Amino acid sequence: MIAEIITIGDEILIGQVIDSNSAFIAESLNSIGISVGQITSIGDTADQIKQTLDEASLRAELILITGGLGPTRDDITKKTLAEYFGSKLIVNEEALSMIEKLLTPRGVQMNELNRSQAVLPDNCELIPNRFGTAMGMWFTRKGRHFISMPGVPYEMKGMMTGFILIQLRERFRLPAVEHRTILTQGVPESHLAMRLEQFEDQLPGNIKLAYLPSPGMVRLRLTAKGAEKQAVRDLLEKEAEKLVKIIPEAVYGQEDQKLEAIIGELLLQKNATLVTAESCTGGTIAQMIVSVPGASRYFAGSVVAYSNDLKTRILGIDKALIDKYGAVSRQVAGAMAENVRLLCRSDYAIATSGIAGPDGGTPDKPVGTTWIAVASPHKMICEPFQFSDVRDRNIQRTSVTALNMLRKLLLAEN
């Protein structure tokens, strides 16, 4: 089954609101074996809505629509759909009852705008909304299914998970779909593609490999479809094992694992503690670490020494060292890691010093130049990196790279 997603709203087209709904809907549909052929965003105009529905119905069996179901004048989707499907708008008693049950416990008195939300096309199937007053609508015409949902993300998600996905599984014979995601760090996407070229060529026809890059890492997603779920799962596991064996040094985890959580587990296994000394990352690494519940068991804290003065006064870096080599150097990054480890009496330390940009670069040290150090009582690793000229990406890439360097050190010292 092929689906299309249509998001309605002028606020999307002018960039005031980011369309996160489409991503959620597409991921949800793919998880049950429905492929999304196209995603379209349009404005709040009746003619455009009708034209887009006509075009989508030529390509897809399932069309999902979000937006324009509010009670105000600028929300025209319900009226337009009634016209498109030749419906009469009538009070739906089931919808009215749902709205009353939603509002009454909140102490909200029903008004005409609330009541108008219970007015629905007479030839649609009601999709309940557990979190709001805008009901969803399911239309069927000429073998095509049209599903309209509110644009409020948590209301749409409630409809998708609580009703629509369940109904799609029950009403249609859908293929079994399985995904495996391999998480990599430290190898660029283009290099991974070259190393995995032969692997991709030999993949069975029902398995696809997708590259999903983000700053500092690349997710490799294997997707398999078939008639029988267990057979699909077994085949996918076999191919995932092959992939990992080709690039073992780049793989740090699978599925939704996070580097910071993996590091936490390794530290707990060692009964060890960690501290960070951050300059160019400004506390980002510490924030990532403490986002994991229970981080207080192994994370001692962080020193954000952004200025050279703090590097000297708090971390005890020799000013002569900074003057001779510069703050962005092997010598200073290594000293930051070792000094903060001793200062905080921790087993492991991470230190970062770099030029995040967009200013501050020199011919010898352009924007993106970064030194990362990780230290333990037994070893010091200090490596240079040349990232991009985009500040936010540099901070993220430095943070992820530093965490993975620590992960490798922890494993090496097991």
Image: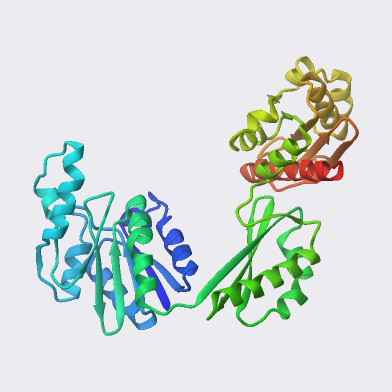
Dividing the picture into quadrants, the one containing residue 374 is top right
Dividing the picture into quadrants, the one containing residue 224 is bottom right
Report the residue at 48% width, 73% height from top: 33
Report the residue at 74% width, 67% height from top: 241
Q: Is residue 261 above or below residue 230?
A: above
Residue 289 is left or right of residue 61, and the answer is right
Residue 288 is left or right of residue 385, and the answer is left
Residue lying furthest bottom in this view?
A: 142
Closest to the observer, 329 or 343 = 343
Residue lying furthest top in this view?
A: 313
Q: Position of residue 160 (x, y in %)?
A: 36, 61
Closest to the observer, 30 or 353 = 30
Closest to the observer, 297 or 114 = 297
Q: Position of residue 323 (x, y in %)?
A: 86, 23
Q: Position of residue 12 (x, y in %)?
A: 37, 55
In which quadrant will I find the C terminus? top right
Q: Is residue 411 above or below residue 237?
A: above
Residue 269 is left or right of residue 292, and the answer is right
Residue lying furthest front in this view?
A: 230
Q: Position of residue 71 (x, y in %)?
A: 18, 52
Dividing the picture into quadrants, the one containing residue 372 is top right
Camera sees residue 361: no
Closest to the observer, 189 or 322 = 189
Count of picture labels: 0
In which quadrant will I find the N terminus? bottom left
Q: Is residue 163 above or below residue 269?
A: below
Camera sees residue 285: yes
What colour scheme was applied to this rendering of the protein? rainbow
